[in-house]
Amino acid sequence: MRGHNQLHSSILRSLENGSSSRWRISSPSPPPSSPEVPLAEIVKSNMKITHHMRNGQCQYALSVFNSMPARTSVTYNAMVSGYLSNGKFDLACKMFDINPHRDLHSWNIMISGYIKNNSLGAARALFDQMPERDVVSWNSMLSGYAQNGYVDEARELFEKMPSNNTISWNGLLSAYVQNGRLEEARKLFEMKGTWDVVSWNCLMSGYMKRKRLKEAKWFFDRMPEKDAVSWNTMITGHAQNGELQEADRLFQECPCKDVFTWTAMVSGYVQNGMLDKARIIFDNMPDKNSVSWNAIIAGYVHSQRMDLALELFELMPCRNISSWNTMITGYAQSGDIAQARKLFDIMPQRDCISWAAIISSYAQGGYNEEALYQFIELLREGERPNRSSLACTLSTCSNLAALELGKQVHGRVFKAGLEFGCFVGNALLAMYCKCGDIDDAYDAFQEIGEKDVVSWNTLVYGYARHGFGKEALNIFEMMKRDDVRPDAITMVGVLSACSHNGLVDRGTHYFDTMRQEYGVIANSKHYTCMIDLLGRSGRLAEAQSLMNSMPTEPDAAMWGALLGASRIHGNAELGEKAAKKIFEMEPENAGMYVLLSNLYAATGRWTDAGKLRVKMRDKGIKKDPGCSWVEAQNQTHIFSVGDCRHPDKDRIYAYLEELDQLARKDGYISSTKLVLHDVEEEEKVHMLKYHSERLAVAFALLSVPAGRPIRIMKNLRVCADCHNAIKHISKVVERLIIIRDSHRFHHFQDGSCSCGDYW
């Protein structure tokens, strides 16, 4: 626990201190002109400015600029260009504004700067202000429109140009092609009599990218001249689209094979799972580059033939960061975390993909705390986390139920300026749902720009697990109104919402109509939900009838749902039948032994309960010990039943006694029939009082500031007596208490629970 708490504090510090200060300098003011300064001195200073800017030394360049007694337009242009090339757009704008010697080149530089900074409106405003324009000015503006998808505006500008050169024609052609407007591109192509090979390649590539192979071939066959790019475009396109026979024919005919031609064939065979043929091409290559090596290595990695991947990796003379990342990812996906870590530690250079791969390897292997440690190291090394590492870290927070850490990572996403797309947004949404903060989960859902079916499913299931069945169904209706088609996972969430809240009729309706309305065929999870729904509501005969009418034999989960319902309604005979079926399928399932024991205890069959415990002991089956944990004061505090290890144990137990008295005055009565031991009544009360969730509640009430919800996690299902006691405690202390057990969330407030005592 100490290691976990140190991790918790360390992550918070790293995340809170993650912001970086921005380098700022004040803009210079021009000195008075000095005509006596020799032109050679000005040229020399201009060259120094250019040199410093090319080396990223903006401050040195500014020092030279400030020291110059006289400047020319070249001086200012060098400063503006340098700032733009070094990503200092604001300083470039200031320098342009104070330039007293603006020439045509100055305006063209600034227009290009605005376009590269995605300020197209400002670029056009500057363009309109120009005292004079040349073809470079027009082409820069046309290119800006084209690159940003404003094809019609690009065409309008093209029509207004005093004269069009090759760059103008190619720029407009490229705009049409890049935006998928191939018919208009073809019409433009036919307007001009002659085109260079670059233009032919551009149009042909457009058809190929949209899988229109016949049209691409039509242009290829009519090209007046072909270069290596022409052949490579055709070979790559056919290979990527599975037309390997045609790709091989073109490859054999190609008169100008280069390393890209050979690599296209290797990649084509790899992408189509034909590794043996890919290896033959690779081995026969006269020259290989890093792309060639990475393509064949990636093929072996994806097919999990890591021995051959490693053999090539060790022979590779030109390893780059992508080579290392591919190998690390491969070992991580195959479960060999030790080898992944070994490569990660010795790789000469890392990027955000390397970090994401190692974080993912630990998370997928269940080493959640180590995954978080790696995220800390990523931040400490100044690396900017990418979407993959952030999503993986959020998922790790979900697994640990570490809400505060998850919120800090959320803040990191915000500071990084990442859009809340589905990948990170869905991980964030799931984190809030699993960590017990359903309100923030809804806010995270709202922040996702383009929601996919996973986004909707996560929120539907989140509300269902939290006991808010009506809200879950409302989200389901919103999903349909948003024209998102429900899938099988959606309907599991919907049926779970009905099951968790006793909505039998609605659940039955959804189950009966989901195939006709949404094309969802009932699978084992849907049947389990329905058996659970019918069983919990007391309709045990209907639950059995549904099981008998299924197209397949019931599995252990379905019998488990029936056993759980039998326990709730005290039907020992049916419970024994269900348990027998489960033990045949899963003889080591400790949870089902516990459910049957609960059933025996609740009906007073102590002899049978004792025999069952002996049977478990003889078979070596052990029930997981119950434990609960809570985050407080940047630490995770873990409790077990009757725990005396906590440093505040005396204060906790004293307060627990006080809470017990207050709850009893409010009407709480111990449910001693749930104690699985045939002992005296007073001892049963004592045994119930010190369950782990009650100790965690007492500690949290002492530690978490008033006004904040209490959030507690438990590894097993909360017992009925603790459930009843905590309802009363929430009322007498006037606090919201949220408990996540192994099955669902319980929101206790004002003496009631979100589950409606239906769990």
Image: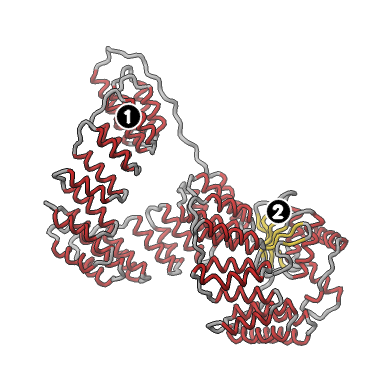
Q: Which residue is drawn at 42% across and 59% down?
A: 344
Q: Which residue lies furthest to the right in this view?
A: 665
567 is higher (above) or lower (below) than 385: below
Q: Residue 336 carries which label?
A: none
Residue pictured at 54% horizontal, 49% vertical: 447
- Secondary structure under badge 2? loop
What is the basis of the colouring in this image?
A: secondary structure
**Residue visible at 44% across and 65% down in the picture:** 332
Which residue is at a point 58% across and 69% down the rendered structure image?
A: 510
Neighbour class for label 2 at 10 Å: few (<14), some, many (≥20)?
A: some
Quarter of the figure that contains the C terminus: bottom right
Q: Position of residue 571 (x, y in %)?
A: 73, 82
Q: Can residue 393 be seen in this view?
A: no
Q: Distance between the residues labelled 1 and 2?
A: 57 Å
Query: Which of the two discs, 1 and 2, labels the residue nearer the N terminus?
Result: 1
Instruction: Work out whether residue 472 or residue 731 is closer to the camera in this orientation and state it.
Output: 472
- As displayed, is residue 121 above or below residue 282? above
Callout 1 amino acid: Phe
The x, y position of residue 707, in whole percent, is 73, 49
Along the horizontal axis of the image, is 523 left or right of 88?
Answer: right
Quadrant location, the N terminus: bottom right
Q: Which disc number belongs to residue 709?
A: 2
- Horizontal arrangement in the rendering, residue 278 relative to residue 321 (left or right): left
Classify mark 1: residues with Cα within 10 Å, few (<14), some (14-19) or many (20+): many
The mark total stands at 2
Q: Is residue 541 visible?
A: yes
Q: In this view, does 208 lie to the left or right of 67?
A: left
Residue bearing the label numbered 1: 127
Q: Is mark 1 on a helix, strand or loop?
A: helix
Between 405 and 207, the residue placed more toward the observer is 207
Q: Give the mark toward the camera: 1 or 2.
A: 1
Which amino acid is tagged 2?
Pro
